[in-house]
Image (tube, helix red, strand yellow):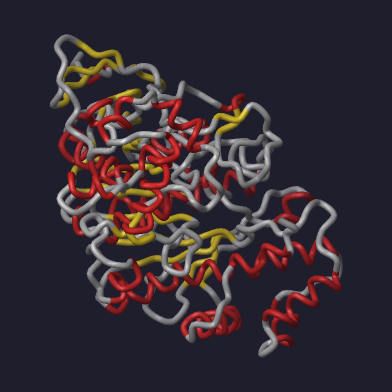
Amino acid sequence: MSNFDHAKVQVREGWLQGYTEGNLKIFKGIPYAAPPVGELRFRHPQPARRWRGVRQATQYSAAAIQHVMSDENLPANVHGVPQLMARSQYEEDCLYLNVWTPAKTPEDKLPVFIWIHGGGMVAGSGVECVCDGDGFAKRRDIVVVTINYRLGFFGFFAHPDLTKEGNGTSGNYAMYDMRQACQWVKDNIAQFGGDPERITVAGQSGGAAATGALHASPLMKGLIQRVSIESGPIYWGFMQPAPLSVMEERGVKFMEQVGCKSIEELRQRDAWDLFDVYEKTPFGEGFSFCVDGQFLPEAYSDWMDAGKFNDFDVLMGSCSQEFPVAGPEGLPLDQYDNYLKESFPDNYENMKKWYPAETPIQAAKMASTIASDIMLMGSAKIGQLCKKYGKNAYIWLMTKENETERGHNAGSPHCAEMPYVFGRVDKGERNPFFDYHWVGADYDFMELIQGYWYQFAASGDPNGEGRPQWKKYEGEFDVCELSNHTHMFTEEEQEKYAYFWNRLNSSKEVTPIRLGRLAKI
């Protein structure tokens, strides 16, 4: 038998020993870059170091430094992973990836699916239970890769001194981590039976915003072929890259706060001591991705409007009830009606028709649906730009609900597609981590959505195998509704979205944030 049969492969840095599980060969904790510690803190990632002998790749390595919650009931604005769900330790040395491959030989050249985890780019990891690659890779001939990347403070800290050191740029280290992971995959994935010319990068929520930035960045040209952007459009979305100057100002303030006189002194400080100080930063005033002049050369919307984005195939969309706006008691009908009158005075009667509610539970669901439909316009905008510049885009809205009373009341929430894409059977109640007993419609939907995602990764077109036809974005609001009865938007549905489209394009403020007052935040 060959080394590959025994889950042993040679990458550029040395030999790796994984393990087999059913039809899969699994490799965990592979370094794709050098540890970003000490002198490499707040620098672009450097190539992974070589080793001699055989490196064991059978256990996950550390995830990025982040808040690890001891209590699941912490406030909703605290991003982190519940301790009971933590699957590894959290360290500054975190630049690792994991590979699941169903290939029988290194010559199979299967499509490759790289997953960028969500968590607002301040939390999460590539080893969360819902995004293990086995449930997708074992059912489809696809190589799945999940990655960790630097988060929050360590992923995005910027400062004028770092900008001088970096020849005019600083921050966005996490974005360069993602690029380095893609480069590692392109260089090495053939050893795992993957095709380096068929690489799809997919991300959800904060990972979707990151994937949108990869779609735009000139530094990604030639590295990958496709992107899947799930519930995180940058255009009209809730995550926007700030100017570099904003991040630099925050960096100056933080340096004063911790009493460091130089970047070198900051690099010598204990990572967790710095993080403990950073955690006290008010929500919304921390470090995130920015227009750094290199990875993102210009403001995102200007860059995209000018058609400067990469020639990648695009799969993009979101869920129909992304934003919860009330608790289990629902939203009082009078409050919902006042919201419609105040927010949509030019279209009040149509809004009542499009989003009817007879109970507080229905009112909460409809208010959430409005916010999510507005979010979908960011995906439609990218579809429209791809059409304008002759590039391929397939846009989706998922309305599939859990087959329970609670599921039908809540709808299709943020993250709802993830258990189906990754084949995490009996997960997905409220969010992808919680148990939910699947029934026949859930298994059918998993086969449908995995088929679409696989075929897109394989060819750039999600169609095939008798699935409902998914039209490329060519006409206005060519959107596929993913549900128990998947179909393209009808003319009536398109009329509803045309209203939001026109409001956004006329610069009137209609954003999901306006629903915050309904959520009693």
The x, y position of residue 87, in whole percent, is: 50, 24
Task: Tell me the quarter of the image containing the C terminus.
Answer: bottom right
Nearest the viewer among 205 and 168 is 168
The x, y position of residue 343, in whole percent, is: 68, 79
Does residue 144 appear to the left or right of 417 in the view shown?
left
Q: Is residue 454 above or below residue 351?
A: above
The x, y position of residue 398, in whole percent, is: 56, 59
Give the image quarter of residue 331.
Answer: bottom right
Q: Is residue 441 above or below residue 85?
A: below
Does residue 125 appear to the left or right of 163 in the view shown?
right
Give the image quarter of residue 323.
Answer: bottom right
The x, y position of residue 43, in whole percent, is: 24, 38
x 78%, y 53%: residue: 327
Does residue 135 appear to the left or right of 342 in the view shown?
left
Does residue 360 appear to the left or right of 477 in the view shown?
right
Farthest residue toward the bottom?
346
x 33%, y 39%: residue: 141
Nearest the viewer among 147 and 255 is 255
Inspect this view and state whether residue 25 appears. no
Inspect this view and state whether residue 402 appears. yes
Badge count: 0
Give the image quarter of residue 105.
Answer: top left
x 60%, y 81%: residue: 496
Task: Tell me the quarter of the image containing the N terminus.
Answer: top left
Nearest the viewer among 329 and 175 is 175
Q: Is residue 280 above or below residue 488?
A: above
x 48%, y 38%: residue: 278
